[in-house]
Image (cartoon, grey):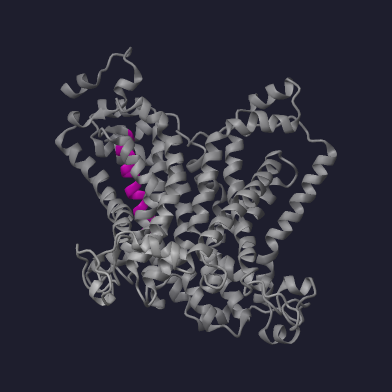
Amino acid sequence: MSSATDTQVPAAAPAKARRRRGLRRLSGRDRVVVALLLGIPLLLDLAFVWFPALATVFLSFTKWNGVGGLHTKTCLPNVPSILNNGCLYGIQNYHQAVTIYPEFWPAVRHNLIWLAVFVLFATPLGMLFAVLIDRGIKGSRMYQSILFLPVMLSLALIGIIWEFMYSQNLGLINTVIGRNGNSNAIDWLGNPHLNLWAVLVEATWRQAGYVMVLYLAGLKAVDPTLREAAVVDGANAWQTFWRVVFPVMRPINVVIMVVTVIESLRAFDLVYITNKGINGLELLSVLVTSNIVGETQRVGFGSALGVVLLVISLVPICIFLFQTFRRESREGPS
Amino acid sequence: MTTDSSLSGSLPRVRAAQPADSGRPRKPRPWGQIASQLFLISASVLWLLPILFALYIALRPYSETTKYGYVSLPHSLTLKNFSDAWSTSGMPHFFWNSVLITVPAVVIVLALASGVAFVLTRVDVKINVALLIVFTAGNLLPQQVIITPLYRLYLLIPLPSFLSGSGLMYNSITGLVAVNVAFQLGFCVFVLSNYMKSIPEEMYEAALVDGAGLWTRFWRLTVPLCRPALAALATLLTTWIYNDFFWAITLMSSGDKRPVTSALANLQGQFVSNQNLIAAAAMIAAVPTLVVYILLQKQFIAGLSLGSSKG
């Protein structure tokens, strides 16, 4: 019974010391189990997520139309691009993107507007919903269900559903505001100065419900004695919220911040279903896609745009990882 | 191993930290209450309006909306648009594609993620935290960051013909399952490993004393205890994978292999003159997620909060 005596750790030993069993102490069969349970998913994750993420960085320094191979020669100036195909292009893709690619800066601006609307409208609106519902007023369960409903729908569907609201001559909005005549109808989704805002209404309609549910979960986790103590100390509802409840919800606030930034970088479906993401609805995500699956494949150039997205998204990702795993790495596996 | 069942039966059920719903004794002042109610009622109306309006269009005959416009009182309501959309557009076929993608993907993600989460919480592989970070961060990347090489990769990987008509990962249902699995793994590993940490160490010690190997401790002890978390994740994943649009648009060239949500984009072109049919098709495509939501609302929201409040 050596295995039984093995595991009889003295009761006084710190819990941490016996928490994890090192690989060395595992039997051969158990090691195979570890290798399979961990190995297969890790391989899948590396092959289909991390390898492509790193390959994007590499491809962004090449000039390639997707046909033929890649090679390690530097691109030659002043030769037909067919001869240069697959060559190393240095930072030329980035240089072209910021200097001569007409859609780049509008797309960056649209992504920033998207983020700003999420931060300034969708998130506070979702938080307001959550705070009101959390106060347990009558019908709160019903409100929660209704406000969350759009999160269940695919963004492509949301785009289609809202087209009936925005339709130029027959849509609900133009009819209600009396602008549905042929002469003075407002073309919400076709006018490049208006359509981004129109689509952002759809996006906010969905995002607010998402933020609401995340925030409700956070509010439920707040220790009720904290609120009681604040009330006993004479704080009003506003003070209790801002001075007591909001600060202890730091983890959830970080999650919401990450979700907000990532969702605004990922935004694609709504603008694609509305007008394929052109004519006022350009986003970085659309540009990446159109450069690789379109007819003219500019793999290197599309990758450079992807790297821009990667670099921006690493900021919230790192903040989230730091916040989440700081504690664990300090404790460390025993 | 009869000890296993008695083991899990005799111990208290492990739950995710679900703090008791604290009844707030404080009653908001009456005017505040009224203002809150008014605000939430108007928000709810605004939130339902687009969905109800689309439903209304779907219920009206084409001839009537062309004559009077969408925004008009109904002379008659009909379900004919729904049956027409269903029968003339190949929707059953697209639904079947969605099933073929969503069901295997959800099952595989949950199976793989529970294995990873178990190893990372219960075996010291020295780089546990680093591996957890690799999985978690992978899920947070925007899809467009990885699409370019992934697209090229999919054109390079051959598949046997029973897995793919095209002979490639590209334009195959297998390929869509694979990318959904790889991408969602991170979130599930993160949630499940948080959940598994709450299982008391004493249970594993008892199992060890009984001579249970690592596989037994995983499959017979840990997985059954994680059932609530697995159920919550299953509802979330079903919705997310069913609703996927981006992977299906970029990694599939032929429309007839696409799942229903992205096939709608094609239907939009096909039905361009008959908006009532589009509305009906959109409503039909929304049914599965709405059913999931209505039946499993609790699990769905539990899944979201498992991923967030434990950060």
Provide residue B164's location: percent of width, then percent of height: 28, 71
In the image, A185 versus B177, the foreground residue is A185
Relative height, residue A227 to residue B37 (above, below): above
Provide residue B217's location: percent of width, then percent of height: 29, 36
Relative height, residue A188 to residue B222 (above, below): below
Which corner quadrant holds the C terminus of chain A?
top left
Q: Which residues are magenta?
A: B105-121
| Magenta run includes residue B116 | yes
In the image, B57 versus B21, the foreground residue is B57
Which corner quadrant holds the N terminus of chain A?
top left
Provide residue A27's location: percent of width, then percent of height: 16, 33
| Magenta run includes residue A122 | no
Q: Main secondary structure of the magenta part?
A: helix
Q: Residue at x 18, y 41 (%)?
A: A32
Q: Residue at x 30, y 25 (%)?
A: B205
Q: Is residue B27 left or right of residue A91?
A: right
Query: In which quadrant of the rendered view does residue B220 lie?
Result: top left
Q: Is residue A186 left or right of residue A282?
A: right
Relative height, residue B80 to residue B117 (above, below): below
Instruction: Tell me if residue B45 can be seen.
Output: yes
Q: Residue at x 63, y 72 (%)?
A: A189
